[in-house]
Image (cartoon, grey):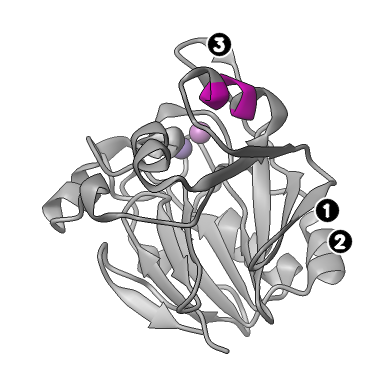
């Protein structure tokens, strides 16, 4: 079965297999890329929300969307505790190295080299997320620098698609991200976390992993895998 991947701007994505809809890092309100594309949190009714870490540009509209849709939110332990305090009814917490089965398949959390806080409060470990939807596996590295164990994560999870940041400054830039995609070894790579604001301006054409197909998605646009 194929999965439709829609880019919602910045690091936010919607995955759908026709039955389940999984949002990753649904930051839409205040996201210039999402707003320019006419995307609104009010239009999102996911069954699940997966969060890489607690930064405001990733948690985004999670609380509002989860309260309205009843979506299960999956993420790091401390982040899930915080969201439960905010009134999110169903959270499913994990930590890097572990995973949780879901109705659509499974979510595993991986390492990410970054930080994780919300309003200055510690939100647990920053993570990458490996989402297995039916027989398609998508690895969103989250905000991270390059690290050698990406090769091991690729070997363990055999992702079909990798989504990774190329904005530099807070994450990998295009050159390190290309190296990351080569280590992970997915056939298809989708760049994100760039051109949302001037400090992370990049030309995605500078992201050229060897032997890996790159699909550059405009906010609001989809691709099937
Ligand atoms: Ni971050
Ligand atoms: Mn970020």
Residue corresponding to mark 3: 121
**Can residue 183 be spotted in the picture?**
yes
Q: What is the crowding at mark 1: few (fewer than 14 residues within 10 Å), some, or many (at least 20)?
A: some
Q: What is the crowding at mark 2: few (fewer than 14 residues within 10 Å), some, or many (at least 20)?
A: few
Residue appearing at x 77%, y 74% in the figure? 158
Question: Alpha-carbon distance for marks 1 and 3?
Answer: 28 Å
Question: Alpha-carbon distance for marks 3 and 2?
Answer: 31 Å
For the stretch drawn in magenta, what is the main secondary structure? Answer: helix
**Would residue 40 appear left or right of 117 to someone viewing this image?**
left
Residue 115 screen position, x and y as percent: 61, 26
Q: Nearer the viewer, residue 22 or 117?
A: 22
Disc 2 is placed on an element classified as helix
Q: From which residue to which does the magenta span run?
A: 80-84
**Would residue 29 appear left or right of 121 to someone viewing this image?**
left
Disc 1 is placed on an element classified as loop
Question: Alpha-carbon distance for marks 1 and 2?
Answer: 5 Å
Q: Is residue 147 above or below residue 105?
A: above
Q: Nearer the viewer, residue 179 or 14?
A: 14
Query: Label for residue 149?
Result: 1
Cβ atoms at labels 1 and 2 below 8 Å apart? yes
- Looking at the rendered image, the disc whose residue lies closer to the viewer, 3 or 2, is 3
Residue corresponding to mark 2: 152
Residue 147 screen position, x and y as percent: 75, 48
**Would residue 140 appear left or right of 222 to someone viewing this image?**
right
């Amino acid at each position: 079965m194929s999965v439709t991947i829609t880019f919602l701007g910045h690091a936010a994505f919607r995955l759908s297999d026709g039955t389940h809809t999984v949002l990753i890092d649904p930051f839409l309100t205040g996201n210039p890329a999402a707003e320019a594309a006419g995307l609104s949190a009010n239009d999102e009714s996911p069954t699940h929300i997966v969060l890489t870490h607690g930064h405001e540009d990733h948690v985004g509209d999670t609380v509002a969307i989860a309260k309205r849709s009843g979506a299960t939110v999956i993420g790091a332990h401390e982040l899930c505790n915080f969201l439960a305090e905010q009134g999110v009814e169903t959270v499913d917490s994990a930590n890097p190295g572990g995973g949780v089965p879901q109705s659509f398949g499974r979510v595993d959390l991986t390492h990410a080299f970054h930080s994780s806080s919300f309003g200055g409060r510690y939100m647990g470990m920053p993570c990458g997320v490996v989402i297995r939807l039916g027989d398609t596996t998508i690895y969103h590295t989250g905000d991270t620098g390059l690290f050698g164990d990406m090769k091991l994560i690729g070997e363990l999870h055999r992702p079909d698609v990798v989504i990774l940041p190329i904005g530099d400054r807070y994450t990998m830039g295009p050159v390190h991200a290309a190296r990351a995609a080569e280590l992970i070894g997915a056939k298809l790579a989708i760049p994100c976390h760039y051109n949302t604001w001037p400090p992370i301006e990049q030309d995605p054409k500078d992201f050229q992993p060897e032997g890996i197909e790159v699909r550059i998605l405009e906010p609001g646009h989809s691709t099937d895998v």
